Image (tube, grey):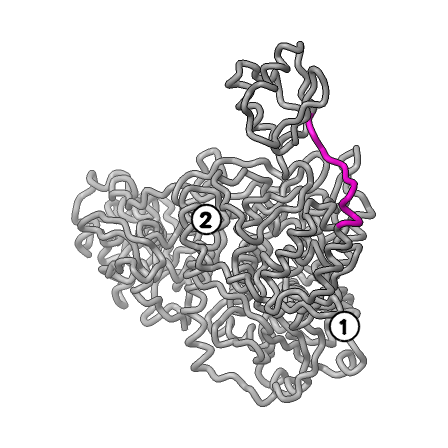
Amino acid sequence: MVSEFHSSRITGRNVEAGEPAAAGHAEAQAVKPKSGLQERTLQLIFSRFAAQPFSQEQLEGKATAYCSGAELVYGLHLLRRAGIVQTISRGWGENYFALSMSEFLSLSQQQFEPEWETGGHPAARTRHVRLLKEGRHGISRTLLKTLSFIAKGGLSLTSKGKLQLRSLKRLAEIIPIQDEDVAGLQLQYAEQEHYPPSIAVLLDLALSFGLVQLHPKGWKISGPALARWLKLPEAQMDGLIMKELLTRYVPPRPFLQHAAAVLLLPSWKPGMWQSVDDLFRLLRKKGISPDASPQAGQGGQTGLPAEQLWLAAWLNLLCAFGWMELGYSSEHEGERAAGSAGYAGGAALLDCGDLAEFPEFLNLMNSPASSVPAALMFRWVRKPELADDHGEQGMLLLSGAEEGNRVCKAGNAYEIQPDGCLYAEPNYEILVPPDTPYTVRWELELCCEPVSEDVMTVYRLTRESVEAALHAGRTPEEIIVFFERAARSGLPDHVRLALRQWGSELGRVSFARVTLLRCADEAAAERISAAKLPAGIIQQIGPKDFIVREEEFDPISRELDKLGLAPLKAPAGAEGAEETGDYPRVFGDVPEPEAELEEGSDPWIYAGRLIKLMKPVKPIKPMKSMKPAKPVSPQPDEASVPDYEELFPGFHSIPGSWTRELKSYHASTVKLLFQQAMDWKAGIELRLADGTYSALPKWIKGGAQWRAAADLALGGDSSSCPAGRFTELSAEDIQGIRITLPERI
């Protein structure tokens, strides 16, 4: 039994006034439909396609006697006008349609949350859940460590453009995610032979938010995007990362997308154990079943379908990202035998014993789990928040578009006050509470050595860590000022003295990267010397030679241009601080970047729906491709419903009675009506000897003595016979006929 969507989900333009409304938001104006066509179409799209893109032909292929292809297409255009369905393009004028990920998640909650609350959920068995795998450190913190490693110049390339093996090894040592945490998803990405799965996922996420770029000499940080990202609260970072995973990491199978979305139900709160069996049972109640697919065969003799093995790998990834814990319980044994058989063609449900040979769980299984039939359990530890009130703004905050800059200025309210958020101990240890903003953590990754990470993160100041900070462009005084501001009780006196002493020992001699400015003659040099240039940006070292600091190259070029001595060209490598490998500054009074963000490389991993998580506001400019498949980009949607002549060619040429009246005709005219309905993919209404039926015509053949076939809609809902009853007909069987077209809205 499939419940209807509430009409409040249909939002968009006011049909009379033609004024646009913001789809998907509470302030959007609801359009009361004249029929349930929008709801029926939306229900079918949600259940059959999930968030996957689909073509008009694929939607028409889902037509039944209860809802014809013509009605589905008309309902699709109504949903486009309401802003619920996006129009997207793969290029070459080939249009597809899809629910946005935000809309899909909202509909999933609307459909499954009441079912879970009213269906009851056994809680007694959770008393005996045994922990199988603890959650690792949070993914946002792991991504921070990866970005810090890159900013320090850790991911450089060889002369042949390959990543250095020692760099990969060093990065793998500092991140908690292991290759086996990711391998079960079988992700495909560029340079797969050179990048281990765990590191590839982190780089992919960094690419997706524009935080890094791949340059000829190695990976580099994008400073403006990094500054915006680090000002977000950790909960918002987690929400944006989860949306990326749902968009691009879930395979293009509706069942898997539904399963991944149901995991985020509000009722499944952190700390509450749930079972995979419960998840499957909930999906089955709503008529959503696994795709027909061969057995995966990955677990040796497990015999489990691929969908169940993928879901186990997905839970394993969420656990590795610090969001979840996994466990098992043998209390399911009796319940499973009694009530769970027959699901997925009678295959066994997900047992921990079945997973004993599955690579992702091989090292997790102990003897009790492998010897006793036990259901795989999971519970959220930290559940990502996907609410639109900050999730959508977070995407704009990271964008370089005009709208993104506007939201960024308004989005400063997101930034947590960085002053007085950590503790500097006399033993040189720095205690970092969990709510410490990431702008502070960014500096700690540079100035300190990590000691431990739990609820409270512990760093330690050492001579070596301070030396690394000085090499990255910090001064001893900058380090002291940072800790004076960030520490609640300031720095202990002896720690402050040690920082100054280390700084004086390490900073007395240093290399400086400068540019040599050479004049063609002494007359030009004299003009430069006599000019009143800003102090400190140029220094004469000879009769015709000056040195210019690299960061001052642009200002001195403008001054020389005013003197009529514009230099011929910029020196190689003088593009600014980011190219020199300096560790970006994000803490303190750092000005907001004014320029738009550069277009970076696209993410690598596209296992899912291949749609960028953006509203179809304006065309997306193409970017350099580093992925194995071309993504689908949302295109501007005029949100207009085609008229009848466009949807049903020749509509004004046929007799009006064909669509208005159920009446009898000559056999030749009945054949014409039947054929016209098939051409339009429309339904028909038939009066037969045993009653009147809505029907979907299937075929018609023959001459004067023709025969036809149609699926007849039975009374009540479609659950007993989803497609209708197939019936062959002759002209004598049809006592009345009418073409049924969707009502104009």
Above or below residue 371? Residue 687 is: above
600 sits left or right of 64 in the view: right
Location of residue 664 by image quarter: bottom left
Q: Earlier in the sequence, mark 2 or mark 1?
A: 1
Task: Name the one closer to the observer, 13 or 135.
Answer: 135
Of the residues tagged 2 and 1, which is closer to the observer? 2
Separation of disc 2 and disc 1 at Cα? 38 Å
Q: Which residue lies at the image location 66% right of the left edge and 56% below the top edge?
A: 480
Q: Position of residue 294 (x, y in %)?
A: 66, 60
Relative depth, front residue between 346 and 606: 606
Query: For numbered disc 1, what is the local secondary structure?
Result: loop
| Residue lying at 53% horizontally and 50% vertically, measured from the top left | 589
Label at residue 614: 2
Q: Which residues are magenta?
A: 504-515
Indicate the position of residue 312 as horizontal and vertical percent values.
66, 68
Q: In the rendered image, which residue does mark 1 sit on?
A: 364
* Res 315 label: none
Quadrant placement of the N terminus:
bottom left
Q: Within the magenta stretch, is there residue 688?
A: no
Q: Position of residue 361 (x, y in %)?
A: 74, 69
Q: Secondary structure at mark 2?
A: loop
Mark 1 crowd level (few <14, some 14–19, many ≥20, 10 Å Cα): some
Towards the viewer: 192 or 455: 455
Residue 488 appears in view: yes
Amino acid found under the numbered disc labelled 2: Met
In the displayed structure, 576 sits above or below 207; it is above
- Is residue 66 visible in this depiction of the protein? no
Task: Give the amino acid type for the residue marked by disc 1 in the picture.
Answer: Leu
